[in-house]
Amino acid sequence: MAFRKGDEVSWSTSQGTTHGTVQEKRTKDFQFEKQQFRASEDEPYYIVESAKTGAKAAHKESALTKR
C-alpha cells in the first residue's frame, strides 16, 4: 500500500505503537539522521513525523499501517 504526504499512519516502537503523519516518500538510497537507508521503487521508505513528540524518522512501507 502506498502512502501520501499527510496520511496518518501508525508503526511499532520498543515502547509500543505510535502514530504520526507521512512527510515524504523516498525511492532512492538516502541518509537520514546519520543512518544510511536503501530505498527503491519496490521498497520505498517514508519520512514520518510523530504526533506525540514531533520527531521525524524513516520507516519502510511494510512497517507502516494507515490509520
Image: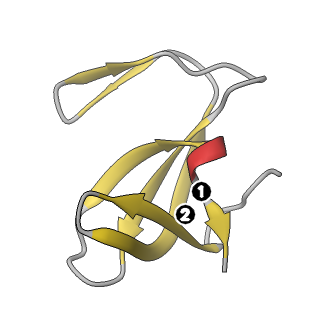
Label 1 sits on a secondary structure element that is loop
Residue in the picture at 58% in, 18% down: 28
The kind of residue tagged 1 is: Leu
Residue in the picture at 42% in, 60% down: 12
Label 2 sits on a secondary structure element that is strand
10 Å crowding of disc 2: few (<14), some (14-19), many (20+): many
Q: Residue furthest right?
A: 1
Q: Which mark is residue 64?
A: 1
- Count numbered badges in the picture: 2
Residue in the picture at 44% in, 59% down: 48
Residue in the picture at 35% in, 82% down: 51
Horizontal side of residue 43 vs 39, given as left or right? right
Decide: marks 1, 2 in contact (CB < 8 A)? yes
10 Å crowding of disc 1: few (<14), some (14-19), many (20+): many
The relative height of residue 30 versus residue 9 in the rendered view (above or below) is above
Q: Earlier in the sequence, mark 1 or mark 2?
A: 2
Quadrant of res 41: top right
Residue beneath disc 2:
22
C-alpha gap between disc 1 and disc 2: 10 Å
Percent of width and height locating residue 21: 50, 72
The relative height of residue 6 versus residue 5 in the rendered view (above or below) is below
Q: Nearer the viewer, residue 30 or 61?
A: 61
